[in-house]
Image (spheres, grey):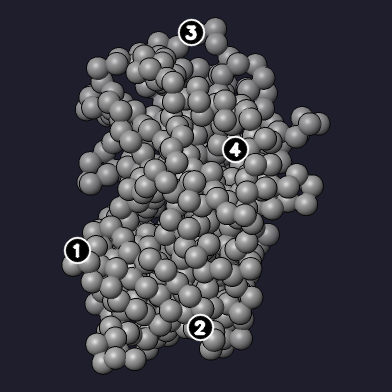
Amino acid sequence: MTKSNKNTIQEKDAVLIGAGIMSATLGIMLNQIQPEASIEVFERLDEVAAESSDAWNNAGTGHSALCELNYTPQLPDGSVEIKKAINIAEQFEVSKEFWAQLISKGVLKNPAQFIRSVPHMSFVWGDANVSYLRKRYETMKDHHLFRGMEYSEDQLTIKEWIPLIMEGRSPDQPVAATKMDIGTDVNFGALTRCLFEYLKKQPNFKLRLAHEVRDLERLSDGRWKIEVRNSTTKRKRTVIAKFVFIGAGGGALPLLEKSDIKEGKGFGGFPVSGQWLRCTNPDVIAQHEAKVYGKAAVGSPPMSVPHLDTRIIDGKKALLFGPYAGFSTKFLKNGSWLDLPASIKINNIRPMLAAGLDNLKLTKYLIDQVRQSPDDRIEALREYVPTARKEDWELEIAGQRVQVIKKDPVHGGVLEFGTEVVSSADGSISALLGASPGASTSVSIMIKLLQKCFPEQVKTWEHKFKEMIPSYGKSLATDAKLAGETRRRSSEILELQQLVEENI
């Protein structure tokens, strides 16, 4: 090996690919557990959180299953299943607990930079949907994670909650709504930037922006050789790492394929793009203060659940409606049109074809969405805001999501609407695929990743985990007292709306 080549090779304990909320969360955890560990993050763009974690690209902010109807499906017998909602609500409480601990330790400074209280509501109309929402409420209200949920079918009451949605609506239309005041708005782009600001000050951490990982290869000793290219200088570097995390959003699948681990064989990706209608009229924006979720169209992906969404972005109150789904062969908003065809390999072509045949309704839905005119989008908005005027709204391009396609012994391949962690048997490399609920459950996802990839070390890290997450090892879903105490403590530190004492 020549002297010049030696100068370009560096060794790291961990390399994290992608500077979004997942890598930021994992980076903070590793830094808190082992401050002496050397960590390097590579991001192909010239700023952090510019893809899926960015507020304008993110289809959901603070998913906690308080209002998202796709997490509570109605079963054939008419009952409503809430197991997934309980699981997501628990994981979001863990995320808040982790962020609260970071505030207490001084890692994060000001919770208002990234999180604030906003009511979470579900809203439906029509007899069948009202019946469904009533059953959902009756099933959820007695579980401690959803205690305090309000329900109404009275138009006047609902108008007090969401006047913008009720103004101009027919008084004869059957409507129903649920409301949880402890809902939150989380700006994951801002949170990611705050986490990286702290990490950049740590002696063993490096963040490399405008650096694209071009290839990775497992060495004979189990470590990974990573080829990186500086997009600005065009200079190439080689990094040797003991552990690699691929958290590059839609870009994770191509890199997983490059790793050539057997656990990654057979995975495919189905990209779904999105668009928002963004309100430009301050008077209209001021009339709404909630995240209001409705029912998704038949065949639509979870990220396309319609919602009228109050957010704080760049310090200003914003109002968005959507997202409207679309199709693109890009795996990233700033990706290549060749991403999808380049991802098709011999080992995943059968699962991808099988999943495509099983999801013809989804394909038709996406085609219909792509063909929508501006007037069509406004008509869809008027189902939620009857008085909406076209001149008060403009189109905003959202981010890309890549839904996971994986092998299935029965169907050949299935399309998964969730997140999937794929790790090598030796735990030396792990990739995160998929989308919703993603960012909101990032803390639980990263804890599970560490448990899977570092099974022996985790035994000695337990006290560190409990410092970061006091409820670690216990169930907030089954322990009502612990859940109440955890929620109270997190809400106080994060300066969030709290339930009254008797409802916790």
* Identity of the residue drawn at 63% across and 38% down: 356
**Circle 1 residue:** 232
Q: Secondary structure at mark 3?
A: loop
- Per the model, the C-alpha gap separating discs 3 and 4 is 26 Å
**Circle 4 residue:** 70
- Per the model, the C-alpha gap separating discs 1 and 2 is 28 Å
Q: Secondary structure at mark 4?
A: helix
- Per the model, the C-alpha gap separating discs 3 and 2 is 67 Å
Foreground label between 4 and 2:
2
**Circle 3 residue:** 170
Give the quadrant of residue 71: top right
Viewed as shown, does residue 79 lie left or right of 254? right
Q: Disc number at residue 219?
A: 2
Foreground label between 3 and 2:
2
Residue 120 visible: no
* Identity of the residue drawn at 47% across and 79% down: 224
Tell me which amino acid carries mark 3. Ser
Question: Of callouts 4 and 1, which one flags the residue occurring earlier in the amino acid sequence?
Answer: 4
Asked whether disc 3 touches disc 2, contact meaning CB atoms under 8 Å apart, the reply is no
Above or below, 76 against 194 in this view is: above
Q: Nearer the viewer, residue 314 or 58?
A: 58
Above or below, 501 against 165 in this view is: below
Asked whether disc 3 touches disc 4, contact meaning CB atoms under 8 Å apart, the reply is no
Q: Nearer the viewer, residue 235 or 170?
A: 235
Question: Of callouts 3 and 4, which one flags the residue occurring earlier in the amino acid sequence?
Answer: 4
Tell me which amino acid carries mark 4. Asn
Question: Of callouts 3 and 1, which one flags the residue occurring earlier in the amino acid sequence?
Answer: 3
